[in-house]
Image (cartoon, rainbow, N blue to C red):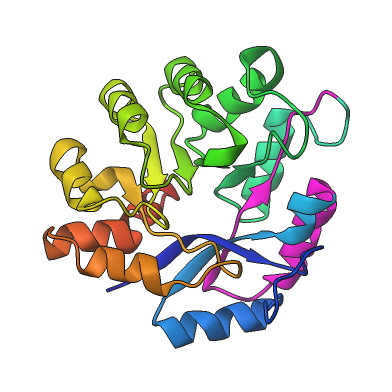
Amino acid sequence: MDFFDCNCMTGRSGQPLPGQFHTADDLERELDRCGMARALVFHALAKELDPALGNEALTRDLAGRERLAPCWVVMPSHTGEMPPPDELCDRMMDAGVRAVRLFPQMHSYSLSEWSSGELLAAFEARRIPVFVDHDQTNWDEVDRICAAHPGLPLVLLRPNYRVHRSLYPLFEHHANLHIEIGIYVAHNAIADCAQRFGAERMLYGSALPHYTPGGPIANIMYSEISESEKALIAGGNLRRLLGEA
C-alpha cells in the first residue's frame, strides 16, 4: 500500500514530547520504519512562531527531498505579514508548494469572508487544498467555507469518533469537504463513510511526530472496504488533491 501521510511536521516544537524527533532526516527514517512512501509536511516554526519564517525554514529543510512534499502555513495578508493572495499563490507555485495549512485560532484571525474570503478564493481558483485542524474551527464555519467556495478542497484534520452527527450532513451538502482519518476511530467508521459518501472523501494522516502512524494504518488496512478504496485513502486521494493524479 502506497501510504502518503497528509499531516506531518518537521522542526523543533516549543513544547516537545519526550523522545520526539524534529529533523527531516528523522522524519524520513520514521517513514521507512513504518513502511510509508511520502509525507506532506509543515514546519513547527510556521505554526508556533511566524508562518513566513517557518515556511522559509521548511523550504531549506526539504530541499532535495522528493519524499517530503511542502505544505505552507498561511494567513490573511491584511497586516502585511503575508503577501497578497495572488502573489502568495505565485510564490507557492514557484517553490513547488501545492497545499496550505491554516491555524486561525492559534494565529488570531477569522475564517469568515470579511477576513479570509479573498485568500480562500485565490486557493479555490487554483484548486489548492486547504488543511485545517478540527480544533481550529467549528462546524458552522466549515459549512460557510464550503458553501462560499465550492471549488476549494477543504480537508478537516483530526476529527474524532464523535463527529458523525455533524460531519454526515456536511458531507451531504458539500462535495469539496474531506477528512483525515488519524483518530477517526468510531466502530466501522471508515467503511460506513465510504459506503455513504465514497472513499474519495478520506485521507490518511498520522500527525507525526506527536503521534505514531500505526493506529491509522491499521484502521485503514482492517477496514471492511475494497483494496482499491484502501489505496485511495492511503495516498491516492492526497495525490489527486495535489494535482499529481
The residue positioned 50% from the left and 22% from the top of the image is 145
Q: Nearer the viewer, residue 8 or 124?
A: 8
Count of numbered badges drawn on the protein: 0
- Above or below — where is 189 with respect to 60? above
Quadrant of res 29: bottom right
Observer able to see residue 133: no
- Above or below — where is 231 with respect to 73? below
Q: Nearer the viewer, residue 21 or 129?
A: 21
- Above or below — where is 93 with respect to 229? above
Quadrant of res 195: top left
Taking the view exactly as shown, the residue that stands out farthest to the top is: 114
Whole-percent x and y of residue 186? 29, 50
Whole-percent x and y of residue 220? 27, 64
Q: Is residue 209 left or right of residue 110?
A: left
**Is-magenta flag for residue 7?**
no
- Above or below — where is 233 with respect to 88? below
Whole-percent x and y of residue 173? 30, 20
**Is-magenta flag for residue 67?**
yes
Q: Which residues are magenta?
A: 50-78
Taking the view exactly as shown, the residue that stands out farthest to the right is: 80
Whole-percent x and y of residue 119? 65, 26
Q: Is residue 20 left or right of residue 219?
A: right
The residue positioned 44% from the left and 71% from the top of the image is 213
Q: Nearer the viewer, residue 7 or 136?
A: 136
Q: Nearer the viewer, residue 112 or 224?
A: 224
The residue positioned 61% from the left and 37% from the top of the image is 136
What quarter of the picture does the C terminus occupy? bottom left
